[in-house]
Amino acid sequence: MRMVRLFGAAFVAAVLGAGLAPAYADSHGSEGDPAKGAKVYRKCKACHELTKERNKVGPHLVKIFNRPVAAVEGFKYSKALKKAGEEGMVWNAENLDKWLENPKKFIPGNRMAFAGIKKEADRKNLIAYMKKEGGVWGE
């Protein structure tokens, strides 16, 4: 058993040293795959831009990570989302995961007409893709 732990630690050190750290890891250490997330993003792209600061039916998602909720200028948000933003909520991996699973349940009263993504792996992959392609607020 000790040998397995040593090998595992050495492998992790090698991966991190090579710059291959995951784009998104949740609090349990699970990571998402941005390449698989690109396929999941197809469900989002009709309503959201990820690489251009252009609003569609929904607000653009450029630099969504660490961005305050309801912070895209020129987009008309629901009262529920405005309130969440005013109370200090930001879009981090944990909040995005809950939102993507069930937007109506996570922030009741929002107007997003999307039932959610039920598979946890799909959400993690999508979040990894969004972070990689969309970027981080303030950078």
Image (cartoon, grey):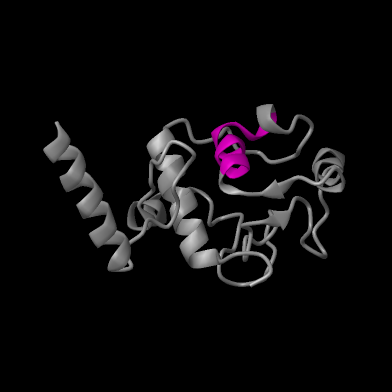
- Horizontal arrangement in the rendering, residue 73 relative to residue 123 (left or right): right
51 w.r.t. 107: above or below: below
99 w.r.t. 86: above or below: above
- Residue 20 quadrant: bottom left
The region drawn magenta spans: 94-104
Q: Can residue 138 be found in the magenta stretch?
A: no
117 w.r.t. 92: above or below: above
- Residue 58 quadrant: bottom right
Seen at 44% across and 57% down, the residue is 129
Work out which residue is located at the far top of the displayed protein and give it: 105
Location of the C terminus by quadrant is bottom right
Location of the N terminus by quadrant is top left
Q: What is the x, y in percent for residue 84?
A: 81, 41
Seen at 54% across and 33% down, the residue is 101
Q: What is the x, y in percent for residue 26?
A: 47, 42
Camera-side residue of 92 and 81:
92
Seen at 47% across and 64% down, the residue is 132
Q: Can residue 97 be found in the magenta stretch?
A: yes
Camera-side residue of 16 and 98:
16
Q: What is the x, y in percent for residue 100?
A: 56, 39
Camera-side residue of 21 and 122:
21
Main secondary structure of the magenta stretch: helix
Badge count: 0
Work out which residue is located at the far front of the displayed protein and give it: 2
- Horizontal arrangement in the rendering, residue 80 relative to residue 40 (left or right): right
Camera-side residue of 19 and 84:
19
Q: What is the x, y in percent for residue 70?
A: 78, 52
